[in-house]
Image (cartoon, grey):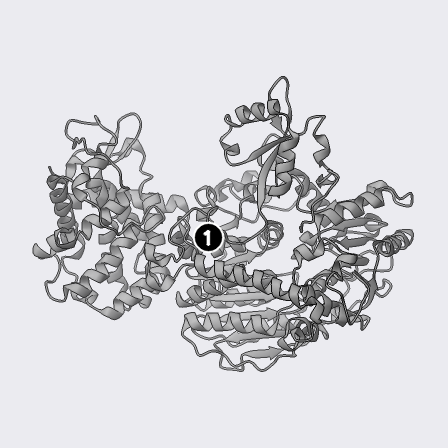
Amino acid sequence: MGIFDYWGKTVEDGRYHLLPYHCLDVAAVGWLLLDPHKSLCRHLAAQLGVEPVVLQRWASFFFCLHDLGKFASAFQGLVPGLSPDLVTSRLIYTERHDSLGYLLWDDNDDGLFFKAAERGAFPTSGQRQLRRTLRAWMQIVTGHHGIPPKTGQIDLANHFTLQDREAALTFLLAIHEFFLSDTDAEILNDKELCRRLNLVSWTLAGIVVLADWLGSGRPAERYVRHSLPLQEYWRDHAMPFAVEAVAAARIENSPIAPYAGARHLFPFIDKLTPLQHWATERELADTQQLFILEDVTGAGKTEASLILAHRLMANGLADGIYVALPTMATANAMYERLRRAYKGLYARDASPSLTLAHGARHLSADFRLSLIPPENRHALQTYGLGEEPIEAFCSDWLADSRKKALLSEVGVGTIDQALLAVLPTRHQSLRCLGLTRKVLIVDEVHSYDPYMNHLLRQLLVHHAAQGGSAILLSATLPFAMRSDYLNAFAEGAKLSPPELFLTDAYPLATHIPAAEPPETALAPRREVERTLTVSLLDSPDNAMEIIRLAVEQGKCVCWVRNTVADAIQAFRLLRRKDWIEKDRLMLFHSRFAMIDRQRIESATLKCFGKDSDAEMRRGLILIATQVVEQSLDLDFDVMISDLAPIDLLIQRAGRQHRHVRDSAGNRIDEEGARDRREPPVFYVLGPPPTEDPAEAWLKTVLPGTQAIYQHVGQLWLTQQILTTGRLSMPGDARAFIEGVYGDAAQRTIPSALEPLTWKALGEDSGKLSMAHLNVLNLGKGYCRESSGGGGWEDEARVPTRLGDDSIRIALVVPDGAETWRPYADVEAFSWELSMLSVPKSRWQKAWEAMSPEIRTSLATFREEYKVLKWVELFPLTTELSDWYDEQLGWGLYKEVDNESD
C-alpha cells in the first residue's frame, strides 16, 4: 500500500480527498498562521528561544502529522466502497484516530519515531531528550479535535496493518525531506527547550485546531484523488487554498494605530478624570504588565483601561483586547459602548473584528448587524430612520461558534469564556490562542466567589507566562484580594512579589512591573464625589413608606432585594397600593424568559439611564435584584437596599445620583455642574442593629438573605459600619471594605454568629478545593495528565462557576390539538427567547403539576427540535399559567423560592 491509497476527507456522495493532501492543506494553513513576519510567530519563537523561520518549519512538519491515525485501516473502513484504489479493511474502529496517531508515533521501539530515526530522519545521539520533545509536539498536533490524545497502551495491531505502518512511515519521511532537510534537529536536544515548549504548547495546540478547521474547508469539487508529487500539490493546491481560507476567515491582525491621546478613542471626553490622566501618563514597561484600577462607579475606569490597552498595543506588546464581564447583561452593555470606540485602536483603513462572546449573543440585534461584510455596508448606512451607523464588524466564520469568539481582534463577553482557557474542556486551547497577544481586561473583579477567583488567578498566571498583559477593574477591592491578583501575575511573569504599602488610599492604581512605586494614590473625580446619609430600616413597611413619599414628590425609586422571592413579594404588595400608577411600577430579576428580560432590561436602561428625563422618571419605581448593581449605567433619585456585604452596597449606592441632574431630574451636561436634587439618602433594610446578635439575627427581617450571603458575620460588620449614618465616596471606601473583610475586623464578629461564619468558610473552602481539582496544571504542557480531575469534558461538565442547581426550560403555549409553539411570538430565535433557568427544586414541583398526558405530549414534541435537546419544556396552559407571568416572571406559586438574581 502507498500513501495515496488512503482517504482523508469524504462527503456523502462518495467524493473523497486523499489523506496526504488533506494533511498538506492543514500544514499550509499553519504555515501562513506562523508566518515569521507575523507577531504571533515572533512571539512564540521568542518564548521557545528559536528563530521564527525554524518554528515555522518544525510546526508545519508536525501539522502534516496531525492525522497520522487515519492511516489505520480500521479508520479507512468507516467509509467502505469509495474506490477500488483505496485500502479496504475488516478491522473494527474502536479508538479515535487522534489518539491512534499519537500512539503510532510513540509505540515504544516499534513507533514511527524510532523507525524514522533508523532511516536517518532524526539524530541517533541523545534520543531520550529528543524523543521527549517530539512526544510533546505530537501530543500538540494529534490533539487537533480539542482534547489531548490518549497516551496509554493499546494493541495497535487491532487498528493498523503492517502496510498501514509502512505507508505512515513513508509519508513521514517524505514530509521530513520536504520541510526539514536543511533544519538542524539537534536544537530539540535541549531539556530547557522542552520545558519552554510545555509552556507554549497550549497556544500551539490552539493553532493546530484552527489550522485543521480552516484546512478541512476545501470544497468537495476541489478534492484531489489522483497522485501528485507532494511538492507539486503544495505549490499548486495546498498553498493557494490556504491563502483563500485564511483570508475568508478574516482572522489576520489589523495594523495598530499609533497612540494619539484619549480623545482619539473617545472624542466625547472634554476633561480627563484623574484615573484617565494617570492612564495616559504612567510610564509603561517593555514587557507584560498588570494594572489594577480601583475607583468609584462613574470615574471612567472603562475608558482608562482602553487607553492603557491602546498604549500597550502601540508599543508592540499586544494585538487586541478581550473585555471580560460577570454577566451576559453587563457584557451586552459593554459591547454597546465599545463598538463605537474600538476601531480607534487600529489603522484608519483597517476593518478589525469585534465579537460578543457569551451563550446568548446571537439574540443581540447589534451583534447580528455586525455580521454584515464591510463591502456591503454602503447599502445599510444606519440601523433605521435617524439611528446610528453600524460601527462594528465580525466575520461570519468567527461568529458561528463561541469557541472561535476569542480569536477576533477585540472581544467583549463574560468572564466564563476566558476562564475556559484554564479548564479541561474541549477546545480550551483555542481560547488560549485567542488570548495570546491580547490585553485581558476584567471588570468587577471583586464580584467572584472563591471558585471563580481561583480560576481567575490561575488565568493570570498563565496569561502572564505567555507574555500577556492584564487590566483589572473594581470599584471596591479588599487589600488581600489585590495582593493575590498581583502575586498570581508576578508568578506567571517570573517577577518578585510586589511590596504593597498603600492600604488606605482610594482611588488607587496599581501597576507591575514599574520603574516607579507600584501604587499610585489618585484624586477622586469631583463629579462623582458624594456623601450619602445612610438610614437603617428595620421593617419592609418602612421601605414602603419611603417609596410612597418619593412617589408623591415625583422621584424615581429603586429597591434592590436580595432574593427573587422578596422582589416578587414587594412588587405584589406595591401593586395593591392605591397611591401608585400601575404603569409606573417595574420588576427586574433573572427569572424571566429571555424575550421578557430583554424588554425589561431595555426599559430599565431607557427610564433610568443617562438620557432619561424628568417625565420618564417621575414617580417611577423599580423593584430589582442584583441584576442592576453591576455595569449598568442607571441613576435613581432614591435608593433602598436590603442589607448585603459592604462592597455590594457601595455598588448599589453608586446607582444613586450617578449623573448630574436638575431638581426635576433632567440631565445637566455643563462642565463642573453640581447635582441640584435633594441630598441623597441611602436606605438599608435589615434587622435592628445590635452589638449582641442572636444566631437568627438576620432571619428576623430578611429570612431569605442568609441563603445568598452566608457570611452573616460580614453582614453584621457591614451594618455596624453603617450605623455611623453616612457613606462618603470615595473617602470611606477603603476603610469600609477593610472594616468588613480585613483580618482585624473578622476577629470582632460576635460569638453567636461564629458558627455561621465557620459554616460559610467551610463552603468557601469546598469551592476552593473544587477549583484546585478542576483547574489545569498548565506547566505540564498539553497532555491529558495536566487535568487533575482526571478527564477532559465539554463546557457543561466542567463549570466556570459553581451556581445553584438550575434547570434550563423553554416556555410553550398550546398551538392547536396536541401541539405547541414557543412562548416568544417572534420570527427569529423564538425558542431561545422563550427560555429561562429555574431552580431544580422548583422545576420538580412544576413537573409534578403537569398531567401525564401533557408530559407525554411535550416529550413527543421536543423530539422535533434539536434546539430543545437539553431543555425542559413547561406549558402555559390554562391550568398551569400561574407559574409564569410576563410582569412577574417565574414565581407565581404560593411558596416562592429564596433565590438571588
Q: Nearer the viewer, residue 85 or 892?
A: 892
Q: Residue furthest top?
A: 817
> Residue at position x 78%, y 54% from top?
559
Q: Quadrant of the N terminus?
A: top left
> Residue at position x 59%, y 26% from top?
855
| Residue 497 place in picture, x, y as percent | 47, 78
Please say if 157 is above or below 13: below
> Residue at position x 45%, y 73% from top?
490
Q: Nearer the viewer, residue 359 or 40?
A: 359
Is residue 184 something one can see in this rendering? no
The three-letter amino acid code for the residue at tag 1 is: Leu
| Residue 818 place in picture, x, y as percent | 60, 19
Q: Is residue 39 left or right of residue 515?
A: left
Q: Nearer the viewer, residue 416 or 409?
A: 416
**For residue 367, what is the image quadrant?**
top right
> Residue at position x 55%, y 76% from top?
282
Residue that label 1 marks: 406
Task: Look at the numbered disc 1 and give the secondary structure of its residue.
Answer: loop
Q: Is residue 220 left or right of residue 167?
A: right
Q: Is residue 749 left or right of residue 42?
A: right
